[in-house]
Image: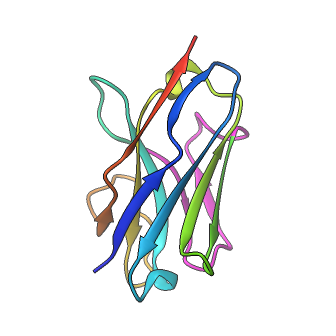
Amino acid sequence: QVRLVESGGGLVQAGGSLRLSCRASGRTYSTYAMGWFRQAPGKEREFVSSITRNGDTTNYADSVKGRFTISRDSAKDTVDLQMNTLEHEDTGVYYCAARRFGQAIDIGGASNDYWGQGTQVTVSS
């Protein structure tokens, strides 16, 4: 069993930055691919970014490429999302996800094994 806890959300003006962090508890964190998703009000949850279990490959949604950076620190059992040049459209609840057995994060979401409770990001225009 893995528990994911997000932190770092808040209110920021457009053009500003935030850094989200997801801390994982569980013995096999290092074998999990990790990712971030978000859900805006009235919209479906969407993929934001993912990172493989050993951190050698990252993936980003087109809407955040060049602005967001995902990273992981296995020593701390964390995966971070650095968000720069934030836009109003980035507003939403951001969720951390994990997938077991070395499989890549499912960008559709359904096949991921664990989810955090989410952290709110609000970007004022």
User: Is residue 107 at all visible to an observer of this figure?
Assistant: yes
The N terminus is located in which quarter? bottom left
| x, y percent for residue 77 | 54, 75
Q: Is residue 84 magenta?
A: no
* Relative height, residue 63 to residue 22 (above, below): above
| x, y percent for residue 39 | 36, 36
* Relative height, residue 83 to residue 49 (above, below): above
The C terminus is located in which quarter? top right
Spot the residue most to the bottom.
27
User: Is residue 104 at all visible to an observer of this figure?
Assistant: no
At a point 46% along the width and 81% down the height, the residue shown is 29
| x, y percent for residue 123 | 54, 22
Q: Which residues are magenta?
A: 47-67
| x, y percent for residue 61 | 55, 43
Residue 10 left/right relative to 66: left
Q: Nearer the viewer, residue 76 or 63?
A: 76
At a point 48% along the width and 72% down the height, the residue shown is 33
Residue 26 left/right relative to 85: left
Residue 42 left/right relative to 15: left
For the stretch drawn in magenta, what is the main secondary structure? Answer: loop
Please say which color scheme the image uses: rainbow
At a point 69% along the width and 26% down the height, the residue shown is 16
Spot the residue most to the top.
125
Q: Nearer the viewer, residue 62 or 90?
A: 90
Q: Is residue 63 magenta?
A: yes
